[in-house]
Amino acid sequence: MAKLAAALTVLALLGCMARECQAGYASPPPHTPCSPGHPSTPPSTATTPPPATTPSPPASAELVVGYYQKTCHRAEDIVREAVRNANAGIMAGLVRLFFHDCFIRGCDASVLLDQADPSSATEKFGLPNLSLRGFEVIDAAKARIEKECGNVVSCADVLAFAGRDATYFLSNKKVYFDMPAGRFDGRVSLINETLIHLPPPFATVEQLKAGFAAKGLSADEMVTLSGAHTIGVSHCSSFDDDFSDRLNASTSDMDPKLMRSLEKQCRSDTGSDNTVVQDIKTPNKLDNKYYKNVLSHEVLFASDAALLMADDTSAAVRANADDNNVWEEKFKAAMVRMGAIEVKTSADGEIRRSCRVLNTY
């Protein structure tokens, strides 16, 4: 399986080069930022978060906080209840699902579609997305919203709220922020765009910078969002293949003890692609341990280790490792900024009744 994945990645990256990708990534149109709008009414459920420290993203008329106060005032509460009922692994999957959605065509829920263009499979079936999780949480929240309010809340906003709420629960209710809304659901989802836009686990620091810059995000925001690798699991093929031989003691800077442990965990007599936790210290908690792991060479991906290969990203890693509170505030702001990438409007989007299919089906 690992060798097959590597071969497929080669073919996809060769296709990417043929399309003149910059540093391995295509350059999309400029992103549309958002505005903070008016604070939303504090949730009234038993898991009411603390007052949010709302980051200050760039100004735009597209997204506002409390967007559904008049049309579906319980929308955010419903999503939070659905996320709360998920386990830690699914919550981590929701954060990743939000990232993978925003980085391909903007935050438009195109990653949720099972079908769109009859001539192409959708993003969901792209190689980097085959291990995505959390779809059932989005479906449950959307179905409940449809029952209470009708077809007024987009799947893109449901996913954005779910990514925000997953960080809240995984951080032991420390990381909470207002997520601006008003996104529309995209009508296009193409499998061949996944490898073009999503940073691979073997990316160099310059490729990472270029990929995030193409989305309007800074190098510091890239390092900040990389902190999400403190939660969830990874398939062994993501760090032990022809592109990223992280378990090779002669070429890898990985901590020897961790390397030996991973060799045992990844060994399979049946050829299955085993999974391992991404953060060996606090695997189910969103915190700054990831940065300490980077500094001690206890990270899985070559792209994680690459953060120490440039002065600016290395300095950001050290700053985030030194102060969890500082990193939490930066993570809130970076999540909002990411949620504003290439926002769809009513002119090029819709509000789906079901998040997995277009309204035309």
Image (cartoon, rainbow, N blue to C red):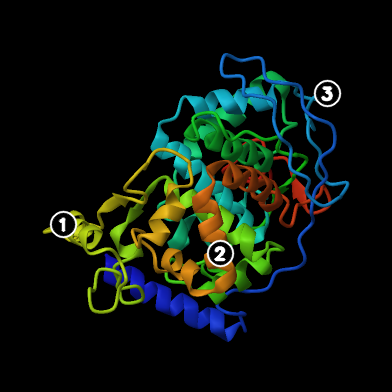
Q: CA distance from mark 3 to mark 1?
A: 55 Å
Which circle's residue, 3 or 1, is located before the other in the chain?
3
Pointer 3 residue = 70
Q: Position of residue 14 (x, y in %)?
A: 48, 83
Relative depth, front residue between 266 and 285: 285
In terms of image quadrants, where is residue 119?
A: bottom right
Residue at (43, 38) in percent of width and height: 285
The quarter in which the N terminus is drawn is bottom left
Image quadrant holding the C terminus, namely top right
- Residue 189 seen in this snapshot: no
The amino acid beneath tag 2 is: Ala
Q: Secondary structure at mark 1?
A: helix
What kind of residue is marked 1?
Answer: Lys
User: Residue extending furthest left?
Assistant: 269
* Amino acid type for the residue under numbered disc 3: Lys
Q: Which residue is mark 1?
A: 264
Q: Where's residue 356, x and y in %?
A: 56, 43
Closer to the chain start, of discs 2 and 3, is: 3
Task: Name the mark on residue 315.
Answer: 2
Q: Are marks 2 and 1 in contact (CB under 8 Å)?
A: no
